[in-house]
Amino acid sequence: MHVSPDDHLTIGEVVRRTGVPASALHFYERKGLIFSERDGAHQRIFPRHMLRRISLIIVAKRLHIPLSDVAEVFAGLPTDRAPTHKDWQRVSRRWKKQLEERRRVIESLEQELTGCIGCGCLSMKACLLLNPDDTLGGRGPGPVRLQRPSQSSRTRPSWHDDPET
Amino acid sequence: MHVSPDDHLTIGEVVRRTGVPASALHFYERKGLIFSERDGAHQRIFPRHMLRRISLIIVAKRLHIPLSDVAEVFAGLPTDRAPTHKDWQRVSRRWKKQLEERRRVIESLEQELTGCIGCGCLSMKACLLLNPDDTLGGRGPGPVRLQRPSQSSRTRPSWHDDPET
DNA sequence: TCACCAGCTCAACCGCTGTTGAGGTCAAAT
DNA sequence: ATTTGACCTCAACAGCGGTTGAGCTGGTGA
């Protein structure tokens, strides 16, 4: 039943082992993320270590890392053998940093939104939600502003003012 | 210079006030998020309170709330006048919950990934990263597993085992 | 009168991540 | 000899959130 030499796998075998549909494998190959040789009948033969790359793609997918980033990562990885444990550590730490960054962005948005729930001015000029001024969250990680600015320091049109009047 | 009655605005005026390009306004209108009347020359005339809806769309965009959710929210809002402060509070709290949920998902992924950096097995069967078993993170908010499972309780293929061998 | 500007519609296209389907090849099994 | 199954390629389509461009109308000022 289509069994390949120990170190090579047909696409069907890869599909069964990884759960990734053949259409996606074709797609990844077109994108240059994975490679295959061909047998006499022009059919793909994947080196077994390609399973590692595919695993990495699956992980990236779970983490919502775009394939463009995966491609960047793969550019620094050997193509003739599986990545080493050290390779994995580099990659996973890189992706961890991206998760942290995403979390920080969300936390910052949460704080802004919380500050705006009671206000609701939605003024095109004054509302912080509407005006992503990069001064906040721009430099350095960590919380930027834990307290809402004092009343006096912030323009506060009342709710029923029309925006931009 | 194209000035409309106090309570109505041309599309150009809306563009200038909101910073949203006309093409996007057309798009939002096609999606049923905003409405306009037409003047004699079939040109859009926006009721001034439409600016509030547009502000909400801008906020949603910043929060990465999909337009489908905005549409859902707008379905519960009056179409003939601006949303009230109470409306805003309902909406912003809803979106805040969604941010919290997204943050929790990221936190959970961060933890999984952290646990896997030292392991790197990437086993199709055993790796938690590769096998999103909904038992984790599925029920209840908050951290699910703060410590990595004990060596004994978890299958740990060594790095150089081929996945799925 | 003529240019110009604001606006209009409709269709096509962008990047992303794949999926679906049509139509063909090849080897093994019946 | 035929059928089945696995595989191939290529093109088109999906949803999301719009943008771009062509070709039109209508009002205003020089």
Image (cartoon, coloured by chain):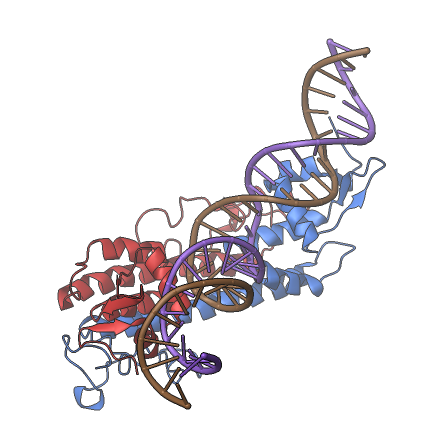
Chain colours: A red, B blue, C brown, D purple
Q: Nearer the viewer, residue A35 or B153?
A: A35
Q: Quadrant of residue A116?
A: bottom right
Looking at the image, can residue A160 be seen? no
Percent of width and height locating residue A91 = 23, 62
Q: Nearer the viewer, residue C6 or D12?
A: D12
Q: Is residue B51 left or right of residue C29?
A: right
Q: Nearer the viewer, residue A91 or A83?
A: A83
Q: Nearer the viewer, residue A87 or B82?
A: A87
Percent of width and height locating residue A157 = 62, 47
Q: Is residue B46 left or right of residue A60?
A: right
Percent of width and height locating residue A156 = 58, 47
Percent of width and height locating residue B104 = 41, 71
Residue that appears at 73% across and 49% down: B49
Quadrant where the N terminus of chain A is found in the figure: bottom left
Residue extending furthest right? B40
Residue that appears at 38% across and 50% down: A137
How many discs appear?
0
Does residue B2 sit above or below B97 in this rendering?
above
Quadrant where the C terminus of chain A is found in the figure: top right
Q: Quadrant of residue B33?
A: bottom right
Looking at the image, can residue B112 be seen? yes
